[in-house]
Image (cartoon, rainbow, N blue to C red):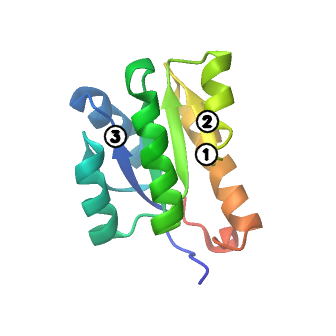
Amino acid sequence: MLKSSTPKIIILESQMIIAADISLQLSKLGYNVLGINTCPGDLFKTIKNKCPDIVLMNLKKQNTAQRLRTARTILKTFRTPVIFLSAYTSQDLFKKIIHVQPYAFITKPFELKDLRRGLKTALDRMDAEGYWDKSNLQV
């Protein structure tokens, strides 16, 4: 079924102050933030209950393996696109994440235009895959 309203997003970020800032910026861009999770265990419950269109997930060097497993589970189980945010941008990381096939990658620190561009990339891919009808997009 094609989705055609304001995209709903859930944030996975271990630092609440950063997550709150991301949430505020997403709201400024017109997105509907359904929630913030600080750990993957809670995230699965939130996805099941709130059915987001996109999960915005922070990656750190020390949690990369766990977050990549989480992203694979989200994509496979819930068929929900994942966008990664990270200040960690090594070649090694990109080799690891390519197999997860995120819908976008946003480098931290980012500006509002970077967030907008990453979300547009994800929504364009979702539209190309028949998952999203961007002709009725409300952002």
Marks 1/3: CA–CA distance: 27 Å
x then y, percent, for residue 70: 42, 47
User: Looking at the picture, does residue 38 appear above or below residue 87?
Assistant: below
Could you tell which of marks 1 and 3 lies nearer the N-terminus? 3
What amino acid does circle 1 point to? Val
Q: Position of residue 120 (x, y in %)?
A: 65, 49
Out of 139 and 76, give the one closest to the viewer: 76
Residue 77 image offset from top left, x and y in percent: 46, 66
Mark drawn on residue 97: 2
Reading the image, the residue beneath label 1 is 100
Amino acid type, mark 2:
Ile
**Spatial separation of the CA atoms under disc 3 and disc 2:** 27 Å
**Position in image of residue 29 (x %, y %):** 48, 47
**Location of residue 57 by image quarter:** top left
Report the side of 130 relative to 2 (left or right): right
Q: Quadrant of the C terminus?
A: bottom right
Residue 24, numbered label: 3
Give the label on residue 45, or none. Answer: none
Q: Residue at x 66, y 27 (%)?
A: 94
**Foreground: 53 or 99?**
99
